[in-house]
Image: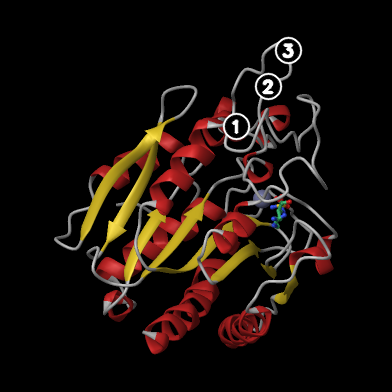
Amino acid sequence: EFDFFKYHDFVEIEEWLKNIDSPLASLESAGKTYENRDIYVVTIGDDSQPKITVDCGIHAREWVSPPMCLYLIEQLLNGDYKELTDGVTWVIFPVLNPDGYQYTWSDGGTNPAKRFWRKNRRVNDGTSCIGVDLNRNYDVKWNQAGTSSSPCSFTYGGTSAFSEAESKAHSDHVNKLADVQAYLTFHAYGTLLLYPYSASRFMDAHNKEELHDLAKEYSSRTKAVNNEFYRYGEGADIFGAVSGGSDDWAHKSGIPISYTIELRDRGQFKFALPESMIEPTLKENMEGIRAIFDHVSKAS
Ligand code: 0X9
Ligand code: ZN
C-alpha cells in the first residue's frame, strides 16, 4: 500500500505511477533528464475538454510538493474528488525535476549537504558547479532579476531560456495542448499563493483582478479545512522582481489562470516539513484546487 502521507524517493514514485490503473488516465514521458530519468506526465481526461495543468517537484528539496500531485491524481481517480474530472482534463507532472529530487534522497535523505539541493543535476560546462534552477529557466525576462548568471549560485538560470531538458520538455508538452485554462505549480515553503507577474514590478497580468479574486477564493476554501491561512498576491509585490519562472511563462503563453502555490510551513521546519504535516497540507489544498476547477468549469 502506497502511503500518500509519507515521503517517497523517485524510484518508489515511479513505481506508483506505472501502476496507475484507470480508463481515464494515461502515463507518458514528456522527455528525459540529463541523468536519463523520465519526466512523467499523467493525463486524466481527453483532449476535447478544457484543461488544468499542474506540476510538482520543480525544486528538489521541497519534499511536500510531489505528494500534492500524487494525492491529487489519486483523489481524482479513486477518492472524494472524482467529480473534478467532469468536463475538465488534468495534465499533471508529478516530479518535474527527478534528478535533483533523487539527489536529495542520497544517504536516505539524511545528508544535509544533499537533502537541501534545489536545482537540477546538469553538469555546467567550464565549471565544477552543478545544476540550473529550473524556475529561473523559463522565458519571461530570462536572466533579468532575482536570478544569477553564476553556475555556482542556487538561482543560476542556465545558458538561455529553456536550456534545460526539464523546462524544455515541460513547456513543449504544455504548448501542444489546446484550451489550457489554468496552471498550478506547487512549491514549498511559505504558505502563499502567487500570481503573475513575478518578473517585473512593471508588468501586470491582463486579468489581475480575476487572479486576485480567485486567489482569495482558493485561500478561503483552504482556510476552512484546518484554519491555515494562505496569503496571496502578485509575485513581484510579495517577493520583488524574480524573472524566468514557470508561472509567468504559463500566463504569457496564454493560460489565463496561473499560480505558484507555496505549501506549508511558514519557516519553522522549512523544507524538512515533518511527515505528520503532509496530510493536513494536502487536504486543505485539495479544497483550494476545487475552487480552481469550479472557476474553470463555470467559464466554459
Ligand atoms: O523563487 C522561487 O522560485 C519560488 N519560491 S521558492 O522558495 N519555492 O524557491 C517562487 C516563485 C514565484 N514565481 C516566480 N518567481 N516567477
Ligand atoms: Zn520552489
Query: Is 129 drawn above or below residue 240 in the view shown?
Result: above
Place of residue 217 in the rendered image (x, y in percent of width and height, measured from the top left): 59, 87
Q: Residue at x 22, y 58 (%)?
A: 25
The amino acid at mark 1 is: Asn
Can residue 47 be seen in this snapshot? yes
Looking at the rendered image, the quarter that the C terminus falls into is bottom left
**Residue receiving disc 1:** 120
- Of residue 224 and residue 260, the one placed in the foreground of this image is 260
Query: Which amino acid, by three-letter code, is at mark 2?
Result: Ile
Judged left or right of residue 11, residue 23 is: left
- The residue carrying mark 2 is 130
Q: Residues within 10 Å of mark 3 (few under 14, many from 20)?
A: few
In terms of depth relative to the viewer, which is nearer, 5 or 25?
A: 25
Q: Is residue 4 visible?
A: no
* Percent coordinates x, y for residue 143 in the rendering: 76, 40
Q: CA distance from mark 1 to mark 3?
A: 14 Å
Counting residues from the N terminus, which is met first, the one under dot 2 or under dot 1? 1
| Element on which disc 2 rests | loop
Q: Quadrant of residue 60?
A: top right
